[in-house]
Image (cartoon, rainbow, N blue to C red):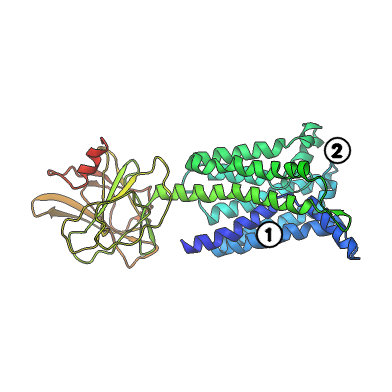
């Protein structure tokens, strides 16, 4: 978790800086440099704001792996080439139709946005559908009608005669892009995450507008410095939007991940299960599972790892710790899953099947046990019992949450401890 958090901060801060329109900030900086006797032009200063964000973005994604880091570098290279062919100075409502060189630059902006979005999706794979749509919307929202991807799209639409003049006078592209982000995050994690997008968008767009109404001029050395707080407000607003991604990732991950075993994430072997109960294993030796979260702890006196702290969505399964049965093992060394009748059992981890065996449960009831070596920790074995109709063989590769292991769960001829909690929930 710490590695994810360390990478998330700089990468999202950098993305916020890249997405924010820095045209006004660049113009204000040029004016300040002029007061100091430094001759500079907007096209020379604007890249410094984008470059600062790009550095943070690449640094953060590189911490997630070499591949997303290299992809981010490639995206920034495309962005640099795009700015060389179509700098912000040409993205105006009076430059139509744009010449081929500008149109080529616009194409590179789109390519850069796609590569950077893909780098994020590679570094932070969405646990559920909707992440790609949200990333695409965020890519379109980068910049404004005078720069970056939004400016390139406005310029392209203007060249073919679509949207003038209202596309430059109203934040149409930004609003549409934020709508796409909102819908994508809603699909991924619901309103707990998606609701942050309109809030952040309102701050990013409306904050500078409100500032202009209440403080028309903020003079320093004869220069209106309103651009500085306006830029910071825009970055902050986009930061709120990007935090929606963080929250969506956490919620969706919580829904997918039930527990962590020595750094290995385990998903529910029955996606339709609504109750999962941690309990003391029957024999000595099993390692403790770290729950993704715990809604109820009925064995508070026994030692157990602290939950990961994931935020479950409204439709996430209930993870509970079952009461003690007087066994010597710790409270979370085993996990009962209330599998709906007829639901196939899928692999809780990505790895290789070590064994598929038949045994006698309590010496009286025929049962099956499957052992899997996780790719992340091949020295460990994840064991599943109470199965009917095993569908895998020794040496077979399995994927977490996808590969069927058995036709279903065994209907035990006696009451199980978790039955009480499913009955309480009317299941």
Query: Dot 1, how many residues are within 10 Å of its Cα: few (below 14), some (14-19), or many (20+)?
Result: many
Q: Are marks 1 and 2 in contact (CB under 8 Å)?
A: no
Residue that lies at the very extreme toward the left in this rendered image:
364
x and y percentages locating residue 34 in the rendered image:
90, 61
127 relative position to 85: left or right: left
Identified at 19% across, 52% down, the residue is 368
**Within the image, what quadrant is residue 300 found in?**
bottom left
Q: Which circle's residue, 1 or 2, is located before the other in the chain?
A: 1
67 relative position to 347: left or right: right
Marks 1 and 2, how far apart at CA = 30 Å
Above or below — where is 310 with respect to 407?
A: below
Identified at 33% across, 68% down, the residue is 379
Residue that lies at the very extreme toward the front in this rendered image:
214
Q: Which mark is residue 97?
A: 2
Q: Quadrant of the C terminus?
A: top left
Identified at 18% across, 42% down, the residue is 411
x and y percentages locating residue 208 in the rendered image:
73, 45
Q: Secondary structure at mark 2?
A: loop
x and y percentages locating residue 70 in the rendered image:
62, 62
Quickly name the residue at label 1.
54
Above or below — where is 108 with respect to 34?
A: above
Residue closest to the eye, 372 or 181: 181
338 relative position to 72: left or right: left
Residue closest to the eye, 404 or 212: 212
Q: Which mark is residue 348?
A: none
């Amino acid at each position: 978790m710490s590695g994810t958090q360390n990478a998330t901060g700089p990468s999202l801060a950098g993305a916020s800086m890249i997405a924010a329109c820095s045209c006004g900030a660049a113009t204000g900086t040029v004016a300040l440099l002029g007061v100091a006797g430094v001759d500079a032009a907007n096209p020379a200063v604007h890249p410094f704001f984008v470059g600062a964000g790009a550095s943070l973005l690449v640094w953060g994604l590189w911490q997630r792996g070499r591949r997303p880091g290299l992809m981010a570098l490639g995206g920034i290279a495309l962005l640099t080439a795009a700015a060389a062919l179509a700098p912000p100075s040409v993205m105006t409502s009076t430059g139509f139709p744009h010449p081929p060189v500008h149109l080529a630059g616009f194409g590179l902006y789109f390519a850069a946005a796609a590569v950077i979005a893909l780098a994020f999706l590679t570094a932070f794979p969405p646990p559920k559908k909707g992440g790609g749509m949200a990333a695409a919307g965020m890519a379109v929202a980068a910049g404004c009608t005078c720069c970056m991807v939004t400016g390139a799209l406005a310029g392209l639409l203007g060249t073919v005669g679509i949207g003038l003049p209202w596309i430059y006078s109203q934040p149409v592209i930004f609003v549409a892009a934020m709508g796409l982000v909102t819908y994508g995050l809603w699909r991924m994690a619901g309103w707990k995450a998606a609701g942050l997008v309109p809030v952040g968008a309102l701050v990013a767009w409306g904050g500078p507008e409100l500032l202009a109404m209440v403080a028309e001029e903020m003079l320093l050395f004869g220069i209106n410095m309103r651009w500085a707080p306006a830029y910071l407000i825009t970055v902050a607003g986009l930061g709120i939007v990007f935090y929606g991604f963080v929250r969506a990732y956490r919620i969706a991950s919580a829904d997918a991940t039930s527990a962590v075993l020595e750094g290995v994430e385990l998903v529910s072997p029955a996606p339709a299960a609504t109750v999962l109960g941690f309990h003391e294993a029957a024999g000595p030796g099993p390692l403790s599972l770290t729950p993704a979260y715990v809604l109820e702890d009925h064995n508070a006196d026994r030692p157990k790892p602290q939950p990961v702290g994931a935020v479950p969505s409204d439709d996430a399964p209930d993870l509970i710790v079952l009461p003690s049965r007087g066994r010597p093992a710790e409270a979370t060394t085993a996990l009962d899953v209330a599998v709906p009748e007829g639901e196939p059992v899928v692999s809780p981890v990505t790895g290789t099947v070590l064994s598929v065996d038949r045994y006698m449960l309590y010496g009286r009831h025929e049962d099956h046990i499957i052992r899997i070596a996780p790719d992340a920790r091949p020295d460990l074995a994840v064991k599943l019992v109470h199965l009917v109709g095993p569908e895998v063989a020794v040496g077979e590769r399995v994927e977490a949450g996808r590969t069927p292991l058995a036709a279903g769960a065994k209907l035990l001829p006696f009451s199980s401890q978790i039955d009480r909690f499913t009955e309480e929930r009317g299941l």
